[in-house]
Amino acid sequence: MKLFMALFLLLMAAASLWAAPAEISYQGLLTDASGDPVADGSYSVTFTIYDAATGGSSKWSEIQSVATTAGIFSVQLGAQTPLSDSVFSDSPRFLGIAVGADPEIMPRTMLVAVPWAFRTATVDGAEGGALSGDLEISGQASIGQGHGTSGNAAFVAGENNNAAGFRSVVGGGSGNDALGGNSVVGGGSGNDASGSRSTVGGGHGNTASGDSSVVAGGSRNTASGNHATIAGGQYNEAAGDYSFTAGYADSISSDANHSVLFGIDSDLTQDSTFMVDMPHVRIGNEATGYELPTADGSAGQVLGTDGSGQAGWVNGGGGGGSTFIRWGNSTAPAGASLIYSGFGYAGHYQQTGPVDPIVVQGGDPGDTNAGNRALFALRTDSGLPPCIPEESFVPAAVCYSSTTALTIWGTHTAPAGWDVLYTGYALGSHYTLDNPSGPLCVDCGDFEFVSAPGIGYALLYALQIYHYATGDSDLQDKFIKCAVIKKQ
């Protein structure tokens, strides 16, 4: 039994005109050893595709039961074992046929393409689908519609984009131009990367015209300087070489090479300059950092901090600060820092000795002293303003202010250009006692009460004006206000 002749070999028509077929239509005439058609019936036939006319390797094989009429049969190769494109990855290919247990019929039949199958060399008219595995494209690539792709080895996708530069890329979007060699527009709309090796990441209406310039995104930004960068924002211009800006409407001129600008509608024209033109500039975080001043100080002033997150200009020399004592409280007020704390001491109210009160820090005593010059703890007496407790020791804090600090009497209000550190009332010795102390500005709002019963202390009384100056009659027999203030 042998296959006398193959009548025709066709690629099966598919639903799409140019779609790759999944099966091959094959028709042949089956004869016996005498050359007569075999009797009508079913016969087991093995079909095998090889990579050589003789010998070689099998690339595909299947067994089908074929029905003959006057020896003629028709089959769909691939109906039992699917045909994949890998079977035809190389050429040529040869079809071998064996009937039942008979040897394979020789010679094998060389597989050729029908005329329309030559269109598979292109992808014209393809509609959807999925690609798996590697895809290699030689030359230009254009995905989408309305593109111009004149650059050698260029790539464009999206809509109405133009990749005219050598090895240029437009990754997507609409109306974008990659005109410079090796230039890139990532996406967006109306962007222009015309400089050599320039990049526009996206956004709208951005231009990177300088060589190796970058506009990361935003809207209507222009990086015209070579190696210039605009990180984003709107209406920014970086014309200086190696310049950098971001934000809104900032401009770096062509003379300002190697310069950086952070601002709002700001201009920078100086070379090699780092400029920040913002209403608030902080160093460190919001909790523990500090804010820089927005205007220049006076001649001779230096930059200092108030310890509460605000930096300002202070008088130069000695750091521009000063020390003061907060009587009645062992902590530093807002706007100052603590040096040390303790209790107030002075001479006994009925004895001669040291007059000026001092703050003594406990916990580190010296050697025993048998001398007779004694200090006594300060103690509030009676007849005080209601905010200052009676019969209490006097805690105290030695503090530092970054600007000049001083005590004013007769008011709780700071004059213009000064800030209040704390307010209180004037306390001192009774006018009838031998050892006067004070006056001291004792904190009224935050006095720390520490009970001091009994006698034998350096006593403090509320001071009052007895004989007043002309026009100050309203001060007679009144408690005297006081405030410790610092220069702004």
Image (cartoon, rainbow, N blue to C red):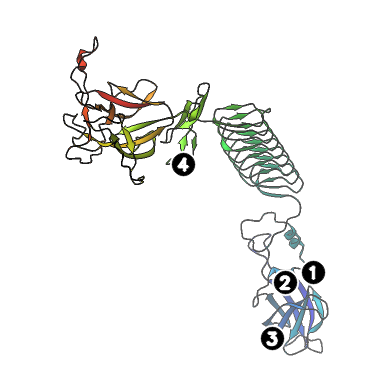
Q: Is residue 360 left or right of residue 153?
A: left
Question: How far is disc 1 from disc 3 in space, using C-alphas?
Answer: 28 Å
Instruction: State if disc 3 and disc 1 touch (CB < 8 Å).
Output: no
In the figure, residue 30 lies in which quadrant? bottom right
Residue 63's spot in the image, x, y percent?
A: 68, 82
Tell us which disc is closer to us: 2 or 3: 2
Question: How far is disc 3 from disc 4 in space, using C-alphas?
Answer: 84 Å
Which kind of residue does numbered mark 1 sit on? Ser
In the figure, residue 394 lies in which quadrant? top left
Circle 2: element type: helix
Q: Is residue 456 left or right of residue 291?
A: left
The answer to whether one can see residue 329 in this image is no
Circle 4: element type: loop
Q: Is residue 377 left or right of residue 340?
A: left
> For mark 1, what is the residue?
91
Lower position in the chain sequence, tag 2 or tag 4? 2
In the figure, residue 277 lies in which quadrant? top right
Lower position in the chain sequence, tag 1 or tag 4? 1
Which kind of residue does numbered mark 4 sit on? Asn
> For mark 3, what is the residue?
44
Which kind of residue does numbered mark 2 sit on? Val
> For mark 4, what is the residue?
285
Question: How far is disc 2 from disc 4 in space, using C-alphas?
Answer: 66 Å
Which kind of residue does numbered mark 3 sit on? Ser
> For mark 2, what is the residue?
87
Instruction: State if disc 4 and disc 3 touch (CB < 8 Å).
Output: no
